[in-house]
């Protein structure tokens, strides 16, 4: 097959334009994060004298002064971010685990079992997912208060986990239900004939085949719980020791706090999600290719 000069030129131009587009979108995406990290390592004096400087100051990077200040407890003149990190990690991890357990069982029931009102429930899942969080905030706050979840820090965090399920369960159930529908029922029927129970079928067949969907759903749910602000503001504001990272970062956005601390707090809340994303990206690739060569 021969190529004309015009065809080769069009191919080269298309390739160059593609890389220019990739570079452009990479820069407009990565530059704000780079500038945020850069400001978090600069002193407030350096920032005020030269705000447009885009080169890192390695002496300031080595000091880590801003990060030390935001991590220290309030009693020591810091911002208490160490406590906020622990609270967010606990709330997001437990909420994700509970959501996945309930959503896997519910998605299996919604796709495999026949019962009255099944179609209505499936539509209800989508409708609940479309309800804005602000609509549910006041009813949940009333229930939250009447059940006594505002008495202690532990009760507030436990109540917040339960509240997060109202936001994470619909989306997790919707995502897993769509994936479970693609799994052949013949595999489950063969397992049932061999004497496997329903729970055994879920554990031995559904979950291994759904690793990519479960991993992506878990990551998405964790991101919701990690970054959520509205419910955390409504339920935790009165008790600083129960604050999550989203509340901690929001309280840095004031005139009294240097912007370098705000940038450092933003880095602290952003980096864990980036790390998780890259970890799960490899995990998802392994899940998609696992079993492809088994015969």
Image: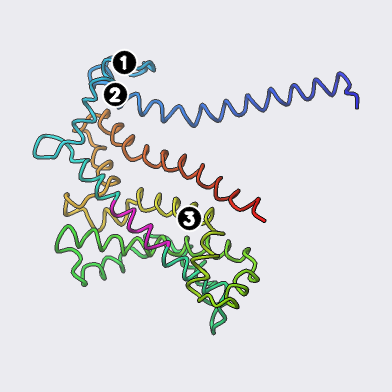
The foreground one among 239 and 188 is 188
Q: Residue furthest left?
A: 75
The boundaries of the magenta stretch are: 90-100
Q: Which residue is painted at 41% across and 26% down in the image?
A: 34
Q: Position of residue 124 (x, y in %)?
A: 50, 72
Per the model, the C-alpha gap separating discs 1 and 3 is 40 Å
Whether label 2 touches label 1, CB < 8 Å: yes
User: Mark 2 = which residue?
Assistant: 41
Whether label 2 touches label 3, CB < 8 Å: no
Q: Earlier in the sequence, mark 2 or mark 1?
A: 2
Q: Quadrant of residue 231?
A: bottom left
Q: Is residue 32 magenta?
A: no
Q: Which mark is residue 57?
A: 1
Would residue 159 be found to the left or right of residue 274 on screen? left
Would residue 253 be found to the left or right of residue 167 on screen? left
User: Mark 3 = which residue?
Assistant: 217
Q: Position of residue 85 (x, y in %)?
A: 26, 44
User: What secondary structure prevails in the magenta region?
Assistant: helix
Per the model, the C-alpha gap separating discs 2 and 3 is 34 Å
The foreground one among 230 and 26 is 26
Q: Earlier in the sequence, mark 2 or mark 3?
A: 2
Q: Which residue is painted at 89% across and 21% down in the image?
A: 4
| 261, above or below 199, in the image | above
Whether label 1 touches label 3, CB < 8 Å: no
């Amino acid at each position: 097959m021969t190529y004309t000069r015009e065809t080769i030129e069009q191919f080269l131009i298309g390739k160059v334009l593609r890389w220019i587009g990739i570079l452009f979108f990479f820069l407009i995406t990565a530059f704000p994060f780079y500038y945020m990290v850069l400001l978090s390592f600069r002193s407030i004096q350096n920032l005020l004298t030269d705000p447009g400087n885009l080169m890192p100051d390695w002496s300031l990077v080595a000091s880590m002064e801003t990060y030390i200040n935001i991590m220290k407890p309030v009693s020591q003149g810091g911002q208490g971010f160490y406590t906020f990190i622990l609270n967010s990690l606990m709330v997001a991890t437990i909420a994700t685990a509970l959501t996945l357990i309930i959503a896997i069982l519910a998605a299996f029931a919604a796709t495999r079992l026949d019962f009255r009102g099944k179609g209505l429930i499936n539509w209800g899942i989508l409708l609940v997912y479309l309800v804005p969080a602000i609509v549910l905030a006041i009813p949940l706050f009333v229930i939250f208060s009447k059940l006594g979840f505002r008495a202690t820090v532990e009760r507030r965090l436990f109540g917040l986990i339960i509240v997060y399920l109202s936001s994470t369960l619909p989306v997790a159930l919707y995502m897993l239900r769509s994936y479970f529908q693609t799994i052949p029922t013949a595999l489950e029927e063969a397992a049932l004939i061999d004497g496997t129970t329903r729970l055994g079928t879920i554990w031995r067949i559904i979950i291994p085949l759904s690793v990519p969907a479960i991993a992506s759903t878990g990551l998405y749910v964790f991101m919701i719980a990690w970054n959520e602000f509205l419910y955390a503001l409504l339920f935790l504001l009165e008790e600083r020791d129960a604050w999550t990272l989203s509340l901690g970062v929001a309280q840095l956005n004031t005139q009294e706090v240097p912007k370098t601390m705000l940038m450092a707090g933003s880095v602290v809340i952003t980096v864990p999600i980036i790390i998780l994303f890259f970890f799960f990206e490899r995990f998802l690739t392994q899940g998609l290719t696992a079993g492809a060569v088994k015969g």
